[in-house]
């Protein structure tokens, strides 16, 4: 088959619409390559597809995530978009207004056709980077459909297409994975903060990364060998595109803006990719979405605070009531009564290593600050901890820029990603959801599923869409950019699958006893520790980063060194004393040194000869070591499996607190050489086939499967899905449209308004409200609650909510009422400790989530369950798993009512300009805009804001009518 022009050149045609001035201004920077690629008439036959047009999906904002310098400049000057950069943004946005009238026939207005292949007449281009693979792109969305006649060719094509669509993003994230973001993208404070957040979680040397490749090859048999061969082919394809794009001058413009390549001479380099980059990339993906647990030092500190206030026994009881390990009122994915005990509280815990009060010090991370790294760290000494990044202020030294590039100066001054992207690990990033109904309750008799991952709103997306067809591979869906040799979430020939972050506890904290060689007296800063009786040196890992100003990032030149200590029990995070003896607290997660092991499970999910039914799907998911909830649907069954390398802990060890680093308290069969241990067998992981329905919104999986954080209480975001789907199932005749409507309705609903406001109103209405202003506020809240407590436009494009005042009042009232309700009874210290572990609120307008404000995903973490339990206790209604005591008004209904009225008075008086203070996107007081989703630019292209929707960024709607 003849080779054709590389796909990336197709984008030049958009510059014609930017006006002749813009074309003249940017022409020199692209080598004159403005001609579009002609469409090819060649259409490869599609693989067997049993969905028969009933599989749909969408990925906001679009498939194309690369832009040349010309396209970036046109976007910044004129607002034009590269082809297929944002063409899925409109349909995605429109569902928030259009869902009430949605039918199966109108699903195509809001979702793409996810059938295999590209229909006749819809082929936009065909690229053949090798004779054994073609990359066919459709006219509508430009999605790559990769078809190979050999396995190597298929994977080569996947890497080549990844370069076409995400070259800059892949490069960005491989540097994040190595802790080198500031050296690569610039020294902006956010970049410094991000690498300081992430690198200590997954610090690796190049030898470490290679060992993981070798371990996978040597420990996973033929599939491990095949996985590494596939990975190498993928890297080869990525490098082939990298080289062609550089020579052809159609590489992403960010390389010019960050000083990597000269726009005029083309001098410079895009570093070659290597297979260890994929390990680094996998550590980023796993760190964001697939980990769980940790935080045991903070838990210990808050427990000690509770014990200091109430005494040991009462303080422990009250602390546990807020910890909510197994709240009997929380929503469950498995609601059939099945039990899966894991990580629970032992009756007689042993080996606990609580710190002496006042002795805990965070481990120092950053040293040797120079240049802007030193002068920008206001009030911070060279011995500061990683936490001090919050105080860094930017010191700028803009480079001289010609008039043509002036509009692009400083576009990365705020960083390429938020500084706190990795804060809290995966427990702070789980936002995906799933709704599945068994065929027994659908109109067709076949299962229906609406599901997808929520990976944050970025431009471009962290995920990329693709179809892979080749020997042993047949799938369509999305993969994380840079590790896309397999589809990670999507559909096969007669089945579909998806995942939500599970967050179960796979990370523990150990207290290692410090020592000095030769028997000297250890201190908290000693660099030696006792390992099974031997004084052992800690391994010091370092990363030195430096930067200088560029067009994109004006941060003045600077540098610093990051340093962590690694032990056989993980990475040192804190120093303290326990019973007067110095210790280092270390964090050990089961997936450390195993970032790529999950590749085997994904390989199986893409293999049509392996996944044939629900059982084999579950077997494939068992090979994924990260903590995810996996969901499956075909024409006959729905299924669920919770994956993760769940370590088998020593008897009576409490995983919520630090434990002594002694053999008696180690994970069973623990071997630090490769960080391996005994793991719980598959039948002890929550799993199920053909429950009447499944929902998941990062809620609790099953009875007795202990929560790894304090968020899974009586009110949880999953309630928004569970109540709606349960009603559908009870009625029967569920369709793709009705299940999508349930998801979309939940997506624009305020959790507080639906689930907690009824109890708040009961307290307020326990006596007549005499004050006219307060009575009006209460009536507004009642009307909003009766109408569904939604945050939705009155009509498409109105940018106004139907109950603006009620929404404003709730946004202002919630933080006030929670603090007034709980702080007096808890006391300042315990209130501060508990709210540090579980934030009070995550409304759409709050600055939270992996993209900061305008993050979309909302109501994952908050005190709504605590408020609900406390108010029901005050009212006298039944409460299972009650809090340790009544807090609102100290248990008095009248006093509680006064608390609520006082805070409601303050909230109602707050003007919109104070509740919604405005930012770079919105004017002060603009309620709709404050909620609106903004795709955070990872490069030079920006998109318009869209209506808030609490839903996945990639989503499938599937109903298979047939099976092989």
Image (cartoon, rainbow, N blue to C red):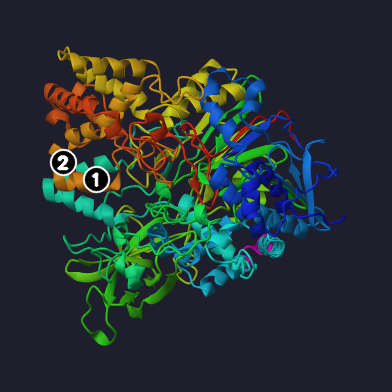
Say which residue label 2 marks. 826
Disc 2 is placed on an element classified as: helix
Residue 667 is situated, as x and y percent measured from the top left of the image, at 40, 61
In the picture, residue 498 is in which quadrant?
Answer: top right
The label number, if any, that marks residue 834 in the structure image: 1
The magenta span reads 217-224
Instruction: Say above or below: 794 vs 214.
Output: above
Residue 709 is situated, as x and y percent measured from the top left of the image, at 35, 46
Q: Could you give the CA–CA distance between mark 2 and mark 1, rounded to whole angstroms?
A: 9 Å
- Other-residue count near label 1 (Cα within 10 Å), few / some / many at <14 / 14–19 / ≥20: many
Residue 200 is situated, as x and y percent measured from the top left of the image, at 40, 64
In the picture, residue 913 is in which quadrant?
Answer: top left
Q: Is residue 936 visible?
A: yes
First reached walking from the N terminus: tag 2 or tag 1: 2
- Give 948 or 890, whichever is nearer the viewer: 948
| CB atoms of marks 2 and 1 within 8 Å | yes
Residue 193 is situated, as x and y percent measured from the top left of the image, at 38, 59
Residue at x 55% of width, y 46% of height: 77
Quadrant including the C terminus: top right
Instruction: Say above or below: 377 vs 169.
Output: below
* Magenta stretch holds residue 669: no
In this image, 344 relative to 18: left or right?
Answer: left
In this image, 945 relative to 603: left or right?
Answer: left
- Other-residue count near label 2 (Cα within 10 Å), few / some / many at <14 / 14–19 / ≥20: some
Disc 1 is placed on an element classified as: helix
- Give 291 or 374, whichever is nearer the viewer: 374
Quadrant including the N terminus: bottom right
* Magenta stretch holds residue 222: yes
Instruction: Say above or below: 335 vs 369.
Output: above
């Amino acid at each position: 088959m003849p080779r054709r022009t590389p796909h990336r050149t197709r984008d030049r045609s958009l510059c014609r619409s930017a006006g002749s001035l813009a074309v003249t201004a940017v022409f020199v920077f692209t080598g004159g390559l403005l001609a579009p690629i002609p469409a090819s008439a060649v259409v490869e036959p599609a693989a067997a597809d049993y969905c028969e047009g009933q599989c749909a999906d969408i990925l906001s904002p679009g498939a194309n995530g690369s832009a040349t310098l010309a396209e970036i400049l046109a976007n910044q000057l004129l607002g034009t978009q590269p082809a297929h950069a944002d063409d899925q943004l409109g349909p995605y946005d429109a569902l928030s207004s259009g869902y009430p009238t949605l039918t199966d026939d109108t699903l195509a207005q809001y979702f793409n056709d996810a059938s295999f292949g590209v229909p006749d007449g819809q082929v936009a281009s065909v690229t053949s980077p090798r004779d054994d693979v073609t990359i066919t792109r459709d006219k509508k969305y430009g999605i790559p459909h990769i078809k190979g006649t050999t396995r190597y060719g298929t994977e080569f094509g996947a890497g080549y297409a990844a370069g076409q669509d995400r070259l800059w993003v892949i490069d960005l994230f491989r540097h994040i994975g190595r802790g080198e973001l500031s050296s690569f993208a610039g020294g902006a404070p956010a970049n410094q903060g991000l690498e300081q957040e992430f690198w200590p979680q997954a610090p690796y040397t190049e030898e470490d990364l290679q060992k993981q490749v070798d371990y996978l090859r040597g420990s996973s048999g033929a599939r491990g060998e095949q996985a590494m061969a596939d990975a190498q082919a993928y890297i080869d394809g990525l490098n082939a595109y990298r080289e062609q794009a550089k020579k052809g001058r159609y590489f992403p413009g960010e390389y010019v803006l960050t000083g990597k390549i000269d726009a005029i001479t083309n001098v410079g380099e895009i570093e070659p990719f290597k297979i260890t980059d994929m390990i680094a990339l996998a550590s980023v993906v796993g760190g964001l979405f697939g980990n769980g647990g940790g935080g045991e030092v903070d838990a210990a500190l808050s427990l000690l605070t509770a014990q200091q206030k109430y005494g040991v026994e009462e303080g422990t009881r009250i602390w546990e009531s807020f910890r909510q390990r197994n709240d009997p009122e929380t929503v469950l994915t498995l609601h059939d009564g099945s039990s899966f005990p894991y990580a629970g509280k032992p009756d007689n815990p042993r080996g606990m290593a609580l710190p002496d009060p006042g002795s805990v010090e965070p481990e120092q991370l950053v040293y040797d600050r120079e240049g802007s790294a030193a002068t920008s760290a206001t009030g911070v000494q060279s011995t500061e901890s990683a936490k001090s990044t919050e105080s860094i202020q930017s010191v700028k030294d803009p480079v001289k820029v010609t008039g043509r590039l002036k509009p692009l100066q400083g576009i990365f001054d705020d960083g390429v990603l938020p500084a706190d992207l990795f804060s809290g690990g995966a427990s702070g990033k789980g936002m995906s959801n799933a709704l599945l109904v068994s065929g027994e309750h659908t109109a067709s008799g076949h299962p229906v599923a609406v599901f997808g991952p929520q990976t944050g709103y970025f431009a471009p997306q962290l995920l990329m869409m693709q179809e892979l067809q080749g020997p042993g591979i047949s799938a369509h869906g999305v993969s994380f950019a840079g590790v896309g040799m397999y589809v990670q979430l999507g559909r096969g020939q007669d089945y579909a699958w998806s995942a939500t972050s599970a967050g179960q506890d796979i990370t523990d904290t150990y207290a290692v006893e410090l020592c000095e060689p030769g028997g000297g007296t250890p201190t908290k800063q000693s660099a030696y520790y006792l390992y099974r009786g031997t004084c052992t040196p800690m391994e010091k890992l370092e990363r030195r980063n430096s930067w200088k100003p560029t067009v994109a990032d004006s941060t003045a030149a600077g540098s610093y060194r990051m340093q962590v200590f690694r032990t056989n029990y993980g990475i040192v995070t804190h120093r303290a004393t326990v019973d007067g003896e110095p210790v280092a607290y270390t964090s050990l997660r089961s997936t450390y040194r195993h970032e790529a092991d999950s590749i085997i499970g994904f390989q199986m999910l893409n293999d049509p000869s392996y996944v044939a039914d629900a059982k084999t799907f579950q077997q494939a998911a068992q090979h994924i070591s990260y903590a995810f909830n996996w969901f499956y649907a075909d024409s006959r069954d729905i299924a669920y499996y919770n994956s993760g390398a769940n370590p088998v802990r020593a008897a009576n060890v409490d995983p919520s607190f630090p434990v002594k680093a002694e053999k008696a308290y180690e994970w069973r069969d623990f071997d630090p050489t490769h960080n391996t241990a005994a793991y719980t067998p598959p039948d002890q992981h929550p799993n199920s086939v053909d429950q009447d329905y499944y929902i998941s919104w990062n809620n609790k999986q099953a009875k007795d499967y202990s929560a790894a954080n304090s968020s899974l209480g009586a009110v949880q975001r999953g309630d928004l899905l569970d109540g709606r789907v349960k009603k559908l199932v009870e009625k029967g005749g569920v369709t793709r449209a009705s299940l999508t409507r349930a998801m979309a309705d939940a997506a624009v609903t305020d959790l507080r308004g639906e689930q907690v406001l009824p109890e708040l109103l009961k307290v307020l209405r326990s006596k007549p409200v005499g004050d006219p202003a307060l009575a009006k506020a209460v009536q507004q809240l009642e009307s909003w609650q009766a109408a569904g407590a939604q945050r939705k436009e009155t009509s498409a494009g109105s940018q106004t909510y139907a109950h603006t005042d009620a929404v404003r009042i709730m946004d202002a009232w919630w933080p006030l009422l929670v603090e007034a309700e709980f702080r007096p009874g808890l006391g300042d210290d315990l209130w501060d400790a508990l709210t540090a572990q579980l934030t009070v609120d995550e409304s759409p307008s709050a600055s939270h989530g992996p993209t900061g404000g305008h993050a979309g995903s909302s109501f994952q973490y908050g005190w709504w369950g605590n408020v609900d339990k406390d108010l029901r206790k005050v009212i006298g209604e039944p409460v299972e798993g009650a809090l340790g005591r009544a807090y609102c008004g100290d248990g008095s209904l009248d006093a509680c009512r006064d608390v609520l009225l006082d805070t409601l008075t303050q909230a109602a008086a707050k003007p919109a300009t104070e509740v919604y203070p405005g930012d770079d996107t919105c004017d002060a007081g603009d309620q709709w805009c404050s909620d609106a989703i903004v795709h955070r630019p990872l490069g030079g292209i920006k998109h318009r804001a869209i209506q808030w929707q609490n839903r996945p960024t990639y989503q499938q709607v599937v109903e298979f009518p047939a099976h092989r």
